[in-house]
Image (cartoon, coloured by chain):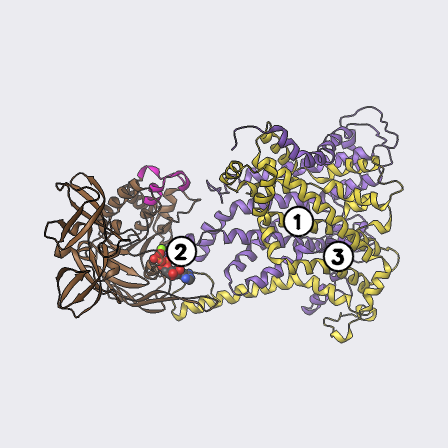
Chain colours: A yellow, B purple, C brown
Amino acid sequence: MVLDTVMYGDEKQNRRKARIRFSLVLTMLILFGIFVVIPFYWMILTAFKTEAQVLTSPPILWLNPVNWQFSNFATAMDTAPFLRYMANTVLVSSISTVGTVITTVFAAFAFARLNFNGRDFLFMILISTMMIPGEIFVITNFLTVVELGWIQNQTYMNAILAMTLPFMTSIFYIFFLRQSFRQIPDELYYAAKVDGTTDLKYLFKIMVPIALPTIITITILNAMGTWNAYIWPRLVTQQQEFRLVSNGLRDAFSNIAGRILYNEQMAAALLVTFPLLVVFLLLKKYIIRGVSRSGIKG
Amino acid sequence: MLEDKSNVKAWFYLAPALFLLTIFIFYPIFNALFLVFLRDYNYLQGTWEGFTLFENFLYVFRNQNFTQALTNTMIITFVSVPISVIIALLISVWLNSVLKLRGFFQTIFFLPYVTNAIAIGMAFAFLFNQNYGLINTMLGWVGLNPVNWVGLGATWGNAMFSLLVYVVWASLAFKIMVFLSGLQNIDKQYYDAARVDSTKRYRIFRRITIPLLSPMIFYITITSFIGAFKAYTQVIGMFGVRLGPPGNDKSLITIVALVYDALDRSGVPGALSEAAATAIVLFLITLVFTLINMQVSKNRVHYSGGGK
Amino acid sequence: MEIRLENLTKVFTNKKTTNTLAVDQLDVTIPSGKLIGLLGPSGCGKSTTLYMISGLLKPTEGSIYFGDDDVTTVPPEERGIGLVFQNYALYPHMTVLQNIMFPLENLKVPKEEAMERAQKIADLVGIGELMSRKPAQLSGGQQQRVAIARALVKEPRVLLLDEPLSNLDARLRLQTREEIRRIQRETGITTIFVTHDQEEAMSISDEIILMDFGVKQQMGAPQNVYDEPANLFAAKFLGTPPINLFDGKISAKKIKLGQSVLGETKESPKDIVIGIRPEGFIVQKEGPIQADVEFVETIGRDTTLIMIDPTDETKRFRAIVDSDHKIEAGQSIALNIKPHKMYIFNQQTGERL
Ligand SMILES: Nc1ncnc2c1ncn2[C@@H]1O[C@H](COP(=O)(O)OP(=O)(O)O)[C@@H](O)[C@H]1O
Ligand SMILES: [Mg+2]
């Protein structure tokens, strides 16, 4: 319950002050905590309501678990093939993540460890493109996948290629991993060279294990990015069943004419959100550490 | 570093990344710069009617939605970024000062980061529902009348307010985590030293915590501005492709939305050039504000010599 | 101002109920206006003691008096102390001047006066020219002085220094410790200087407090502690090169090393540890210790002999003798002992006998 590692004189007055301060801080944290949690609560609550309960005003704020209507999930899945969307998303996410990690590890190694003509110049060019909004690339990339014939008479294979290939590398991750690689002391490299270790072996036996936390971070961030992807998949998929969760979710519940069945909509939203939350709670430690570090420019 | 240059080997390691970057980043940059100067480019036939310097930019500015998009983008950026930075800063300082429940609260505050923008956008839309939403219920508790936030015919102001709440909510998590880890990296001895020197709490915060955290605050502010200028998915999440409450379509359109609007018309001659011009306008706006930001912060940000 | 610690105890309680007894019932009186060296190996509780005196840590038990005031529960900001941290803890975003003025701003000293005082103290510690620099632009020694200036500027009743020289290189360390000595003399502030370096403590302090495992081992003027160690730890910890130790015995009121008799005692028969300082040996034909010389090194007036312990061939001891004696490796020689350089300790308790 202590506010700092530093102790206070334990006169009553000081203690009381500290306790008041703690209570205030706690109150604020709880208030903002509620603000953060409410949308989740609302989503879950609504997902289990019957239509009549949804259309009650003022709304019902607490639902006894025995009254939960699980059939909303089944109905939601009838509305659109959400399991198919999830499968697509997992597939796209895995392919692009594996691709990203591989290309990133190699490129970061070259920038961090190898000495070649134009290295710093090239790196500077890469860094300076990070400021450019992605929309500038999207225009041409769309034309490119059209040219590659991945849009017309699209096969599943084409759709997967179109959704993954442009995202199989990332300048930010190269930059991020290079920072980690550079913190590995030169001496390790020299020692390995003296022992006759090849660069490739050094990379995979020494650097990758040491920088593993960063690589895990990249994996997580990239996978989560795909789960959130909306714009690009919408542009390049021609058939409903090739789409990813975000598109499926948006399209399934955007019928402008009919009235929206909120309980089914929220059931679908929960279906899409739930896997992410589970992954988060399982990998909490890595995600929090990784995300915090990705925000600290090295 | 190493003395001998290993050119061939280095390019071999770089090849996969460079190959992809060339196709999907470098070439598109040049192509956008090319497209933007073509008159009536028809990509289906690969033809255009000569070159033009400004015409495509004029299309952008003459677009009936441009003013609305620019206004919305600016409001989203200049309201949500300062508010979320300040709230995140406060929360992270509070979080840093409690020991016992820190892990629990950290998890809570991080939740918004790991959600799907569309799914949560929909949840927000329903939260703001006029008859069945929680927000109006809560307003009722304090004796206020229900407001039509996002329903049929909702005003631009109400819809924008709802959107801003969502945008701030969604952008807190990342900032809190980064600030919190920044705070935890500050050497405890500075606080001990300040205490021995009879420094008041508020002064410690203002004279020590904030300056030591300033590089991070600055970095987060800049990246948040850049991110906020690109607002779009949040609007989609809450309002769908209609980009506004029913009956008030496109009232929450943003600049990025204009790019995709143009892209959706890609078959029409000139549409791609207009998309490119819009994206370039967005880039220039971002660039200008980033430069202003850097100039303003120049003297207020402390960079330690070595750096952590 | 005199500082009195009574029964001062600190137990760190960990989450997993592992308790660390960092300081154990410390009773010390620190005389006013003196420079006291708080000496002991790493982890013996020196910093903990210092932080309790500063108020940053709360004692588990016991009291702290500044003069007649019981300050045990007074928060650090009201104790009027100056504290210099091991890493200096200079605020990296402030200039030297701002760093030094910071404590005065907190005390609401008018700006003019604060500037004046900051300049005066900066001149005293010899950094008057560096006022507009940032800490990162200073050398270690300069940062050290800024830290001292910041601690001194508010004219504290007590100055506390936690291993202030440990981040400096050897030459600078020597120079800076003289400097600290001088500043302390000039200001006359009661000063506690924490260090794990016995030579540093011996050279700078009016008195030293020797600690081990949170327990006070001995307190006194450096030379006294060296000459009259209270126990085996004190004997071992002070002196370079360190004291030689032998397993010996007392039988029939005689101190015996193997068969040799080194002296007389009134103690009852028991196993003992005999400590002999390297400079406590004399080369003498009829000396009681006969041993083989393994290695000889002569520097100036002194000759250092590495000798094989006659009671245990695997052990070596060191004797520093006059270089007039021509001694070569491989020789066997007889050594006598200066009685005041030899101490005997209870083998079980380590207590001096
Ligand atoms: N905050 C703390 N929590 C738990 N144990 C501590 C803490 N600070 C110090 N200790 C322990 O107390 C003992 C004394 O530490 P310290 O006073 O720092 O030693 P010294 O300064 O003499 O090297 C050590 O065993 C150390 O591990
Ligand atoms: Mg210490």
Q: Is residue A145 above or below residue C201?
A: above
Q: Are marks 2 and 3 in contact (CB under 8 Å)?
A: no
Count of picture labels: 3
Label 3: few (<14), some or many (≥20) within 10 Å? many
Which corner quadrant holds the N terminus of chain C? Answer: bottom left
- Using the numbered discs, state the Cα–Cα distance from disc 1 to disc 3 in whole angstroms: 22 Å
- The quarter of the picture where residue A12 lies is bottom left
Q: Does residue B291 appear in this view?
A: no
Magenta region includes residue C232: no
- Read off the residue under disc 1: A219
Q: Residue at x 73, y 49 (%)?
A: A94
Query: Does dot 1 land on a helix, a strand or a loop?
Result: helix
> Residue B279's x, y, as percent?
73, 37
Q: Are marks 2 and 1 in contact (CB under 8 Å)?
A: no
The reply to the same-chain question for discs 2 and 3 is yes
- Read off the residue under disc 3: B119
Which segment did they paint magenta? Answer: C128-145
Depth check: give the residue in front, C148 or B250: C148
Q: Residue at x 72, y 72 (%)?
A: A62
Q: Magenta stretch mostly in which secondary structure?
A: helix
Task: Answer with left or right where residue A12 lies relative to residue C343.
Answer: right
**Amino acid marked by disc 1:** Thr
Label 1: few (<14), some or many (≥20) within 10 Å? many
Q: Is residue A165 above or below residue C194?
A: above
> Residue B297's x, y, as percent?
54, 41
